[in-house]
């Protein structure tokens, strides 16, 4: 673990930007299965296998390196990682870095793209967003709290199905209301909508949730 931390710090000393994504893209933490945390930097890709046993020490390394002050973390679907962290640590994860979630911001702007495949692509798409307008305030005041706190709590609490007598979990996606793919939603057994209004320009966006058995 010490060598991992030193390696990350040496890379970040030259470029304080990193692109993070999970493999698979959606980690189902109810199955307690291992997943890959991909860390893309100028120097290449580091893949860290994370499971229930090693998540806490790996989280400690992340907080001392990529989650520290002055680092910009470009994420794809950060919410899923923070929900998984809450699942295993029973605590919300608070970070000092700046988080830019491409998936959330691009969805809010009506951009439909797959996850970046490289550090260069992620940074390029981030720079395009920074040249755009109309998302920063909403992202800071609404999206970030949803990513870091609200949705992880919702996904970890669970829902009691009184008919089936089962505890169910909801997986939520954050996106602008008009970008919700209704064809995808038809495949969901149950769909949950939480609609919020951006007071600055009266644009609606929502959380859509898929109910899965625990």
Image (tube, grey):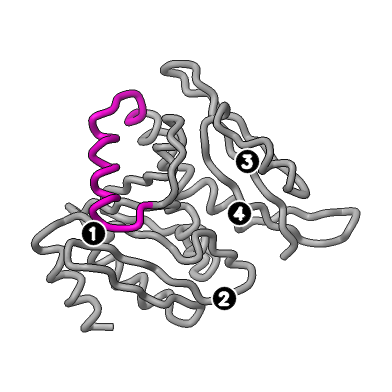
Among numbered discs 1 and 3, the one appearing first in the sequence: 1
Q: Quadrant of residue 56?
A: bottom left
Task: Give the numbered dot on residue 155.
Answer: 4
Q: Confirm or deny contact between disc 2 and disc 1 (CB under 8 A).
A: no
| Range of magenta residues | 116-137
Residue placed at 59% from the left, 74% from the top? 32
Query: Regarding mark 3 in the picture, which secondary structure is present there?
Result: strand
- Position of the N terminus, as image quadrant, is bottom left
Dot 2, how many residues are within 10 Å of its Cα: few (below 14), some (14-19), or many (20+)? Answer: few
Camera-near label (2 vs 1) is 2
Q: CA distance from mark 2 to mark 1?
A: 27 Å
- On the image, the x and y values in percent for residue 103 come to 43, 45
Camera-near label (4 vs 2) is 2
What secondary structure is the stretch in magenta mostly built from? helix
Q: Confirm or deny contact between disc 4 and disc 2 (CB under 8 A).
A: no
Give the residue at mark 3: 208
Does 134 appear above or below 90?
A: above
Residue sitting farthest toward the top: 201
Horizontal side of residue 47 vs 33, given as left or right: left
Among numbered discs 4 and 1, the one appearing first in the sequence: 1
Task: Give the numbered dot on residue 68.
Answer: 1
Among numbered discs 4 and 3, the one appearing first in the sequence: 4
Horizontal side of residue 189 vs 69, given as left or right: right
Among numbered discs 2 and 1, the one appearing first in the sequence: 2
Q: Quadrant of residue 182?
A: top right
């Amino acid at each position: 673990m010490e060598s991992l931390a030193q390696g990350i710090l040496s890379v970040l000393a030259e470029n304080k930007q990193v692109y993070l994504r999970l493999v698979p893209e959606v980690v189902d933490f109810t199955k307690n299965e291992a997943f890959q945390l991909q860390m893309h930097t100028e120097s290449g890709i580091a893949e860290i296998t994370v499971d229930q046993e090693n998540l806490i020490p790996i989280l400690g390394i992340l907080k001392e390196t990529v989650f520290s002050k002055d680092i910009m973390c470009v994420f794809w679907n950060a919410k899923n990682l923070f929900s998984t962290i809450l699942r295993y640590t029973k605590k919300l994860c608070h970070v000092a870095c700046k988080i830019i979630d491409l998936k959330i911001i691009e969805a809010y702007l009506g951009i439909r793209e797959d996850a970046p495949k490289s550090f260069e692509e992620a940074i390029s798409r981030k720079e395009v967003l920074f040249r755009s307008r109309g998302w920063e305030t909403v992202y800071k005041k609404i999206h970030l709290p949803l990513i870091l706190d609200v949705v992880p709590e919702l996904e970890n609490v669970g829902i009691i199905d009184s008919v089936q007598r089962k505890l169910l979990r909801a997986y939520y996606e954050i996106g602008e209301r008009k970008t919700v793919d209704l064809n995808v939603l038809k495949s969901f057994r149950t769909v949950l909508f939480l609609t919020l209004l951006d007071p600055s320009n009266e644009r609606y966006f929502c959380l859509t949730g898929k109910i899965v058995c625990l």
